[in-house]
Structure formats: C-alpha cells, structure tokens
Amino acid sequence: EAQVTQNPRYLITVTGKKLTVTCSQNMNHEYMSWYRQDPGLGLRQIYYSMNVEVTDKGDVPEGYKVSRKEKRNFPLILESPSPNQTSLYFCASSLMGRTDGYTFGSGTRLTVV
Amino acid sequence: ELKVEQNPLFLSMQEGKNYTIYCNYSTTSDRLYWYRQDPGKSLESLFVLLSNGAVKQEGRLMASLDTKARLSTLHITAAVHDLSATYFCAVDMRWDYGGSQGNLIFGKGTKLSVKP
C-alpha cells in the first residue's frame, strides 16, 4: 500500500531532551516536507526536501533540523525541544513535476513539558 | 508573500442544504488542492485542480478553480452529517514563475458542522 509512515504517533517529552520523528514513504517520491498544525494558525511548513541531500527551510524552521540521506526517509530532529514546539506534526510527500498532489502521514502529536 | 484565505472559517449547516466554501489566494498559481481533516486525523486528499477552469466532482462535493480571479470554490450539495469535518485549501507554490519554491501554503480551514 502506498503510504507515508510517521513514528511515533504520540510523544510526550521534557524540555531539552533531543528527539527525532521519523517519516518514510514507499512511493519513490522526490519531494518530502514537514508541517506543524496549531489551533488558529493552520498548517505551516517547517522544512522541505526536493531530493536526496537537498533540503530547505519553510516558514517556521527555527528549532528544527532535517536530513535527507535516502530518498524514502526524511526525519525531523528537535535538538532541544521547548514547550512552544508542542504541536501536531505531519510529514508529506509527492512527485516532482506534474503531480497528483501530496500524500500525508498520519501525524505525530508532540507534547513538550 | 502568498496568502491563502478561506471563508467562512466556521460553517454550521442543516442536512439537505447547499453551501459554498471560498478560497482566495494572493499570487498566481495553477495548482490548488482541497483536503478534508477529521478531528485528530490526517489530511485526506479530496481534489487536485491543475489548471484554470478545472472542475472536479465527487459525491456531494464539487471543486472549481479560476486562476484569473485567484479563487477556488468547494460546493456542497444536499449536505449530510458525514460531511462534518474541517476542509482546507492549499496552493502549491513550487512551480510559480518557473522557480522551485517548494512550498504548499494552506488556508486556515473551514470547520463544517452538518446538523440534522
């Protein structure tokens, strides 16, 4: 089944403890991106990648890192999480060029205390 | 800066009624998507609109795109309770002006509640 898989689905952590949210897609998509969703603010892009070893900042990159060492994986790294990073996170992927759109993962609900 | 504005943000409808959700955006793009999100769930793709004049229909939902007016609409016909969800439009900026901006800009969403 074609899908974008995020892990974990739920995570509660403490301020300053490094964490990684994984994202993997099995559709051979070149493009992958991360979004966070907050009440009243909608979905905002954090980082995106157009292919292996090519990443760029979205609208709200502060406090986040990403890497794209393989085409299928695009992990989101929070080196020192803070409470304002408590949010619902989504990974998405798509083909470059004319596209059928984006496929979203199931989401990761992160709480930083 | 691209802005995507949806209205209304909240919509309470009675079953059987018709209504339209509007999505305005502030710069040129010929790629627009509509998504549905149920509470606590992921985004489900509803429509992909890739050119001016595109119209797509699925069940009680119909989406259209007017790139000259920078406007997309999502029309709901004879609403039923199962359509209750939040609906997002999103404009794809990756190919604007031939550049690769790599950005999908979302509207804030329309929370639809269909009541008996």
Image (spheres, rainbow, N blue to C red):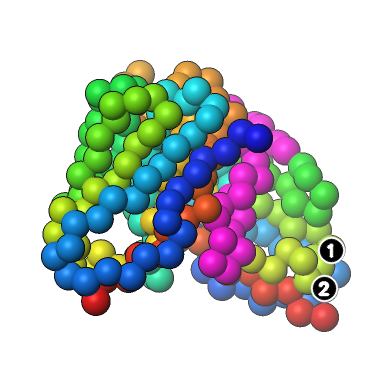
Magenta span includes B52:
yes
As displayed, is residue B31 above or below residue A30? below
Left or right: residue A35 versus residue A64 is right
Do tag 2 and tag 1 residues touch (Cβ < 8 Å)?
A: yes
Q: Position of residue B57 (x, y in %)?
A: 77, 42
Q: Residue at x 17, y 70 (%)?
A: A15
Amino acid found under the numbered disc labelled 1: Ala
Q: Residue at horizontal 29%, vertical 30%?
A: A68
Residue drawn at the location 78% of the way across and 71% of the way down? B81
Picture quarter containing residue B15? Answer: bottom right
Q: Chain of mark 1?
A: B
Query: Can residue A43 be seen in the rendering of this structure?
Result: no
**Where's the C terminus of chain B, which quadrant?**
bottom right
Marks 2/1: CA distance? Answer: 7 Å
Look at the image and tell me in which quarter the N terminus of chain B lies. top left
Find the magenta span and give its range. B35-56
Question: Which residue lies under the disc numbered 1?
Answer: B78
> What secondary structure is found at the residue carrying circle 1?
loop
Q: Which residue is mark 2?
A: B15
The reply, left or right, for residue A4 in relation to residue A79 is right
Identity of the amino acid at label 2?
Glu
Q: Is residue B11 visible?
A: yes
